[in-house]
Image (cartoon, helix red, strand yellow):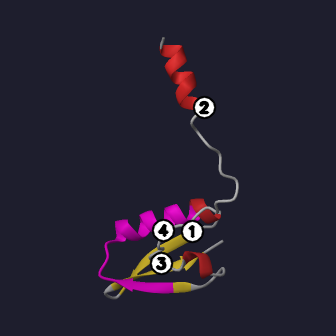
Amino acid sequence: MLDQVLSNEMTKVIIDRTVPMPDSRVVRKYPHEDMEVGDSFLITNVSMQVVLNANWRAGKRLARRYTARKEGDGIRVWRVS
């Protein structure tokens, strides 16, 4: 009985081949993607841990390396490779 119900439900699924996938809704907070080796940006009012986490995630996603250092009241991020 259960097998019949599942097979009947599966026959109701319709495959659409012409529907495009929507654009990503992820909004990147920092310009990691636009950076060349040696480029940097300065951010303020954020903790070092938040910046390090963002650098790590961007590095994994883009296969790049970033480093961060405190500079005055902010944190400067460099692309190193």
Q: Which quadrant, please, contains the C terminus? A: bottom right
Q: Say whether disc 2 or disc 1 marks the residue closer to the N-terminus.
A: 2
The stretch drawn in magenta includes residue 78: no
Which mark identifies residue 23?
A: 1
Of circles 3 and 2, the one toward us is 2
Q: Position of residue 7 (x, y in %)?
A: 57, 23
- Which residue is the site of mark 4? 26
Q: Which residue is mark 3?
A: 30
Q: Tag 3 or tag 1, which sits nearer the N-term? A: 1
Specify which label sits upstream in the sequence, 2 or 4. 2
Q: Amino acid at mark 1?
A: Asp
- For the residue marked with disc 2, what is the amino acid? Thr
Query: Where is 21 relative to 72, above or below?
Result: above
Left or right of 25, for residue 59: right
Classify residue 43 by image quadrant: bottom left
Q: Mark 1 and 3 residues: CB-CB less than 8 Å, in contact?
A: no
Say left or right for 55 vs 70.
right
Question: Between marks 3 and 4, how big is the CA–CA gap?
Answer: 12 Å
Which residues lie in the magenta part?
Answer: 41-59
Residue under label 2: 11
* Labelled pair 3, 4 in contact (Cβ < 8 Å): no
